[in-house]
Image (cartoon, rainbow, N blue to C red):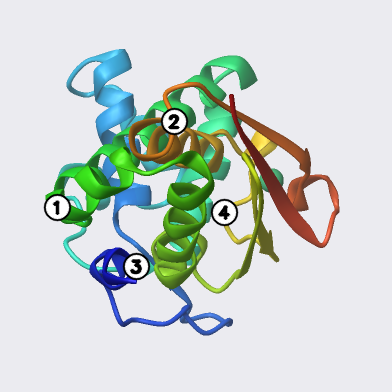
Amino acid sequence: MEVARSLDVSAVASAPAGEDARIGPNAVIQLAAALRARFGKGGGRQVFAVAGHLPLFHQPPQEMVEEATAAALYRALFAVLPAEIAADVAADAGTRTANYVLANRIPMMAQRLLKTMPVTLAGPLLLKAIARNAWTFAGSGQVRTESCGRHFAVEIAANPMAMPGCAWHQAVFQRLFAVLVAPEITVRHPRCCHEGARSCRFEIFAS
Ligand SMILES: [Zn+2]
């Protein structure tokens, strides 16, 4: 289980629920980056302003942020922009977050090993790393994972970052699995806290 250990990149447990619950800063940093990529340098200021967090647009957070702050930013994203564009931007922010994780948080040696493994071994190992680093993308949400052959699932109970379609999370999982487990990955989101469900369920299929 050497790979599992080397993927265990942080000993920080899930953030506690409540007003002080925190989430990884990339939820915010990569949202600003995705907005700039789409709308130009000042693009997206309005989203941060409407959320009441304009300073974060100009000065990206270096440490974990309150999950309420990240959630407010994504609510503002969908309030300011048409739903389809907001979902595109959220997905881009998710892909950028996964790229950051790949570049900075998962050792290259572990990545190379995962890529050489069969899907049925690499998938569960990646899920284990995802669960151990749940605070980075789920804050106080309770994360549970499942694997069965080439099918995998991540379930986030009380997902603090739930948004219409949860494009951010879908893109994070899509990118991580496509790079580390199998090139052809489909992610479905059949159940969502944003629509009143207890948990957000993400199903990941490797073809
Ligand atoms: Zn959801």
Q: Residue 29 appears at what percent x and percent y? A: 26, 46
On the rendered structure, is 172 left or right of 146? left
Counting residues from the start of the chain, the first of labels 1 and 2 encountered is 1
Secondary structure of residue under mark 3 = helix
Q: Using the image, determine if residue 183 lies above or below residue 51.
A: above
Instruction: Give the quadrant of the C terminus.
Output: top right
Secondary structure of residue under mark 1 = helix
For the point 58% across and 32% down, the residue is 78
- Report which residue position mark 1 lands on: 109
The residue furthest right is 196
For the point 82% across and 62% down, the residue is 198
Please tell me the numbered disc located at residue 161: 4
User: Which corner quadrant of the image does residue 202 belong to?
Assistant: top right
Q: How many marks?
A: 4
Report, in whole angstroms, how far the alpha carbon at label 2 lies from the one at label 3: 18 Å
Counting residues from the start of the chain, the first of labels 3 and 1 encountered is 3
For the point 41% across and 37% down, the residue is 94
**Disc 4 vs disc 1: which is toward the camera?**
1
For the residues bearing labels 1 and 2, Cβ distance under 8 angstroms: no
For the residues bearing labels 2 and 3, Cβ distance under 8 angstroms: no
On the rendered structure, is 40 left or right of 140? left
Counting residues from the start of the chain, the first of labels 2 and 3 encountered is 3
Report, in whole angstroms, how far the alpha carbon at label 3 lies from the one at label 1: 12 Å
Look at label 1 and name its amino acid. Answer: Met
Report, in whole angstroms, how far the alpha carbon at label 1 lies from the one at label 2: 17 Å
Counting residues from the start of the chain, the first of labels 4 and 1 encountered is 1
- Report which residue position mark 2 lands on: 182
